[in-house]
Amino acid sequence: MPIRLKRSTKRLIALLALLPAAVLILGLIYMVLMNYLEGAPRNFLESLQWASETLTTTGYGNDSHWKHPVVALFVILGQFLGQFLVFLIFPIFVLPFFEEQFEVRLQHVLPPMDGKVLFYRFGPAIESLLDDLHRAKCPFVIFEEDMQTARQLRDRGYEVVFGKLADDPTVLLRVRQARAVVTNSGDHANAACTLIVREYGFSGPVYALADDPIYRAPMLQIGATEVFTPAHVLGAALASRASSRISQPAEGMHLLGAKIGLVEFRIRPGSELSGKRLGELHLRQNYGVSVIGQWHGGTFTTSKGFDTVIAPGSILVVVGPPANLEKVERMAMPIRRTGPIVLVGFGTVGSKVAQMLSDAHENFTVIDRARAEGVDVVGNVLDSSTLEKARVREASAVILALSDDSEAVFATAVVRDHAPEVPLIVSVSRSRNIERLYRAGADFAFSEGQLAGQILAFQLLDEQNVPVESRLKFVRLSAGSLCGWHPWRSEVAERTGAKIIAVERGGDVFVEFPGDFEIASDDALFVCATLECLDRFQREFQSAPIAGRQGAR
């Protein structure tokens, strides 16, 4: 097998061959010029000495004055050539060679892969997943084709193999023993990698992250186990957070018909709810409504008792009879759901959001810098006149789907300043920028890396609970061990985080309960909470689902 030399080594060999040739040619020319033009003959050795002194800029001995203009011009050109060699050629040719020799060398072939996951190329889509795998002590190897990225990953403590798959596919010979393969390059490169690992006998799962969903079927055909499109999943998450038509805030509300409503209130810092404990407000006793939880910094937290504090600026989720909810509206500011949705950015993610909103028959306005079909307002989101033209203050929600994370953070601050009360939903590429978005004023933030990491963690780490966000659900459950309890007894929420919203008894549904009301064994309980809290409720009180109704009257 022929020896493969690195590029820097080839450069250094070429330089070492050229330097003696340059000294020889320069010396011969100098000898001829001195003999026939200057009239001061020099022998071959003296001419070589002059050439070496000139090229290395070490100065001159006896030869320091010339009378003939052609010789003088030749000497001047030789001096500039010496400067060129010292200040340009040596840093380009010599230093990279020594840098590679003295630094920790990158691997150029896969190590033993027993039980390891192979990632083909690094990028934002797998960044958070790598951190999760590192913490879970799940071994993995990254095959990277960019030298600088490979070095950065090595410095972070990751096991990295550097190479060019198109030039030398044999670097993946040991892939057969890998636990799984994740391809994270362009769609065509992902296809090539999938074919190569299958040709080398890898029979395990190959997970491909695709840019365009049209490549899903071909990639499955050539050997991929699953093909995911994180950008499109991100678009779906953004659309479902902004539109109640796409994803209802609480599944199963139809079970109670018009008797129960669910609303979201933004807690203004000056509101009489801000900073108060639920025990101080007596919302259940005075208004017959239940606080399910609150969104703050993109995290949904269920309320678990009287000591739960309502955070200023949070979004409170409240359930109760519609008439009673209207009374609570006067104490806080409801999230407006009647205006259009404003979508900023019409790229890969933005166009997917627009498609979903259109399919749901939502009223929405698209802002983008470039004029295109589907763009309603052409302009810069950082310009207040663009926001005015799009009537952002009247929007039911604003979605920022920009391609640059820095621009997304800046735009978040601008939109929040322009429309302080409008729900603001933002997407970024890298998970580490989510915290910056919340500090800038976002209500909800999602990243492509976050979603791709959740999808792949489900496959690689057997994580069963990987929701994009907490979703509420109404279920109809048996009384279980709650017989004799009051539906609003504080221990229910404290122990499970779930709330009993209504009780069905003898064909009637009760949503408000006097102090002496007790749950009977044949009652059906309507409970609202997140899926996790509902599971805890059923385990804690030996409760089981009951077939649902078509809607209460």
Image (cartoon, rainbow, N blue to C red):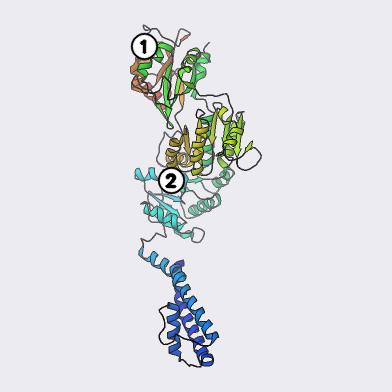
Q: Is residue 245 above or below residue 279?
A: below
Nearer to the camera, 69 or 329? 69
Q: For the N terminus, which image quadrant? A: bottom left
Return the residue found at the far right.
373
Alpha carbon distance from label 1 to label 2: 49 Å
Q: Is residue 162 above or below residue 115?
A: below
Sequence-wise, the earlier of marks 1 and 2 is 2
**Residue wearing tag 1:** 486
Residue at 43% x, 45% y is 127
Q: Is residue 547 visible?
A: no
Identify which amino acid the numbered label 1 is placed on.
His
Residue at 33% x, 18% y is 491
221 to the left or right of 481:
right
Nearer to the camera, 369 or 518? 369
Residue 385 percent location from the top left of the image = 59, 36
In the structure shown, which secondary structural element does the residue marked by tag 2 occupy?
Answer: helix
Residue at 46% x, 34% y is 441
Q: Please tell me how crowded label 2 is: few (under 14), some (14-19), or many (20+) other residues with Cα within 10 Å.
A: some
**Residue wearing tag 2:** 127
Q: Is residue 490 visible?
A: yes
Asked if marks 1 and 2 touch (Cβ < 8 Å), the reply is no
Identify which amino acid the numbered label 2 is placed on.
Glu
Q: Please tell me how crowded label 1 is: few (under 14), some (14-19), or many (20+) other residues with Cα within 10 Å.
A: some
188 to the left or right of 61:
right
Q: Is residue 493 above or below residue 367?
A: above
309 to the left or right of 221:
left
Residue 196 percent location from the top left of the image = 50, 54
Residue 393 percent location from the top left of the image = 56, 29
Instruction: Tell me the tag on residue 22.
Output: none
